[in-house]
Amino acid sequence: MVKNYSLQHLPKIAKEVIQFAKHNVLLFYGEMGVGKTTLIKEIVKQLGVTDNVSSPTFSLVNEYHTTKGEKVYHFDFYRINNEEEAMDMGIEEYFYSNSLCLVEWPNKVENLVPLKSVIITISINSNQQRTIALKNNE
């Protein structure tokens, strides 16, 4: 699925991402500043997370809780140096926990992400219009 959207349509897009996703690991691809974290903030809001949501750039992972008591993990691997760092933090336990895992910069840990995942690619044009492409990997 491919859609164009502006920031005012973000709640609708977040709901569509949630409905589209068949797997618990969502991989967010896109250049710096394209809106990956902004979309993730809206997704967790739609899921009922009331915690303060921010990019875990330095901690690598943030844990949030929904109003239903479910865990949501938000990863940001931008500053990771190698996949061994992700292994040391127990990334596989997160990915196979059945909790929702939202992953920014998954290309930094591409050999560790589950085959069954959702690929979300965001791009932006000169008019600040964004394009989102969604694909369920089987």
Image: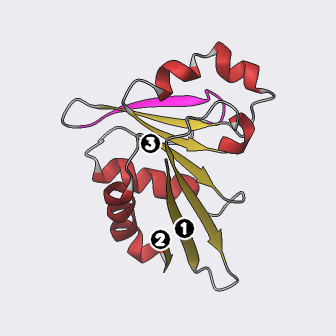
For label 2, the residue is 1
Name which quarter of the figure residue 35 lies in: bottom right
For label 1, the residue is 133
Please say if the residues under marks 1 and 2 sit with CB atoms less than 8 Å apart.
Answer: yes
Dot 1: element:
strand
Q: Residue furthest top?
A: 88
**Residue 109 percent location from the top left of the image:** 70, 34
Q: How busy is the neighbourhood of tag 2: few (under 14 within 10 Å), some, or many (20 plus)?
A: few
Q: How far apart in space, not on screen, are marks 3 and 2 (Cα)?
A: 27 Å
Q: How busy is the neighbourhood of tag 1: few (under 14 within 10 Å), some, or many (20 plus)?
A: some
Please say if the residues under marks 3 and 2 sit with CB atoms less than 8 Å apart.
Answer: no
Q: How far apart in space, not on screen, are marks 1 and 3 (Cα)?
A: 23 Å
Name which quarter of the figure residue 60 lies in: top right
Tag 1: amino acid: Ala
**Residue 96 percent location from the top left of the image:** 45, 25
For label 3, the residue is 53
